[in-house]
Amino acid sequence: MKRTTWLALFAAAALTACSQATPEQQIINDAAAALGGRDRILAVKTLVIEGTGTNGNLGQDMTPAATSQAFNLTGYKRAVDVAAGRARVEQTRTPNFTYFQGQAPQKQVLGIDGDVGYNVAANGNATRVSNAVAKDRRAEIYHHPLTIVRAALDPAAKLTQPRTAGNQSVVDVTTASGLAFTLAIDGTTKLPARVVSMTDNPNLGDVAIETSFTDYQDVSGLKLPAHLTTKTDTVTTTDIRATKQTVDGDAGDLAAPAAAASAAPVVGPPPATVTVEELAKGVWFLGGQSHHSVLVEFADHLTLIEAPQNDVRSLAVIAKARELRPGKPLTYVVNTHHHFDHSGGIRAAVSEALTVVTQKGAEAFYHDAIGRSHTIVPDALAKNPKPLKIETVDEEMVLKDAAMTVNLYRIAGNEHADTLLMAYFPRERLLVEADVYSPAAAVQPYAANLLENIRKRNLQVARIVPIHGTIVPFSELVKAVPSTASTASQ
Ligand SMILES: [Zn+2]
């Protein structure tokens, strides 16, 4: 009897030794046990999270550092087909700030099905999103305790770098499909505390997307977080509070709509089309797509107003500018404001040795933007590094020589941004502005303030040259401001 006991003990000890988990496996095993057990996790087919929350306004707030603007989310529903790698978010968002599209709630449908990312518009039309966006949405599926731990339990997953950070145990997880994450679990409860993955943001370069999990609740034999907060770099981009969570309920049809599934993959931004319209001697409107630029010829150099969107657009605009006046160096770029779609080409402009002229409130932002690493998707500046040369405008700056005069003015008190500059050409009576008046837009929430700024400075504007939309007579701006329309007709 005694001998048998010893043998049994020995056998048990040997078994334990053979199956003893590595430190990285132990973290996953602990997390799985805390969430409801390995078998329960592996049995899950679908997850539906319903609730409310907010989306931040990354890159589009009043100042580069501001984070108070957000879209309030109602009717939020995130459905995930765990095994099939499909997910869809449906939500209605309402801006808590003065938004260029107006204050009406907007319904959004954002999906991912394997490699196909798609959006469904209010009219039901589905479009395929870029491969880069699809990749982020594929990663987003694993920004949840259930999906990341389930993926980490897959024998084909690679677990590396077990470590401790404060009260958290941390491990790197590369899924069977090759996506890389860092998972941190709480040292006490062993519940997943956060998941981090790296991605490229065209403006910010290499950024961490981090989702934190709190307020765990019991759902169908599992522990699931009811509060999920996602940061992109340092900015909270999504904050969700679940009011209902359903495991293995009806997740709906999560297959990509046919129109998106059959569409060609979207690799990178569309090729640039740059049209040229001479507005006056030495002033050209460089249009062709959604964001325009203006080229200005001085006696011995050229200045570009706006390097928008991305490398593709801005490098094409810069090339066109040089083609128009090959004999003069293009040396300056004037930035209308810090918003990502208007600053997305600044790094490209710096890579072409242009000096940036911007409102003072955006100076630190450009120092940061130029210094950031873009190793995941190397951009023009990463491939051709140059130092930032920057000149700032407080309230006004006059660019003047024998050939040309351009007055740069800060647009004060506008609800669109605090860093706005407009460019006034006193001789040509042109006014270049971005976003505060876009002719033909359905709503013009910032136009009254623009008109106020023009009148305050007593500018004799004949034509508005917008960064979005077509060039219009000044009277169109006046008409867009209802309370002043009668004044204009006098
Ligand atoms: Zn803007």
Image (cartoon, rainbow, N blue to C red):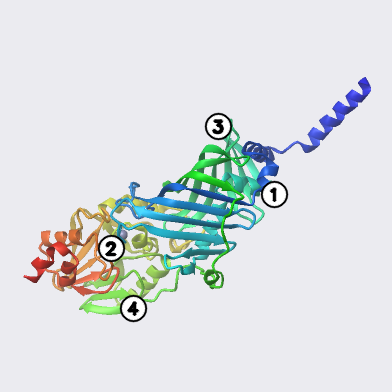
Q: Amino acid at mark 4?
A: Thr
Residue pointed to by mark 2: 435
C-alpha gap between disc 4 and disc 3: 58 Å
Name the secondary structure under disc 3: loop
Decide if ligand 1 comes within 8 Å of the CB at mark 2: yes
Q: Quadrant of residue 269?
A: bottom left
Name the secondary structure under disc 2: loop
Say which label, 4 or 3, has the lower sequence index.
Answer: 3
Say which label, 4 or 1, has the lower sequence index.
Answer: 1
Q: Position of residue 393 (x, y in %)?
A: 22, 56
Q: In the rendered structure, are the residues bearing label 3 and label 1 in contact, judged by CB atoms less than 8 Å apart?
A: no
Q: Which disc, if any, is residue 104?
A: none
Between 56 and 71, the residue placed more toward the observer is 71
Q: Position of residue 261 (x, y in %)?
A: 56, 69
Which quadrant does the C terminus fall into? bottom left
Looking at the image, can residue 375 be seen?
no
Name the secondary structure under disc 1: loop
C-alpha gap between disc 1 and disc 2: 49 Å
Q: Nearer the viewer, mark 4 or mark 2?
A: 2
Residue pointed to by mark 4: 275
Residue pointed to by mark 1: 154
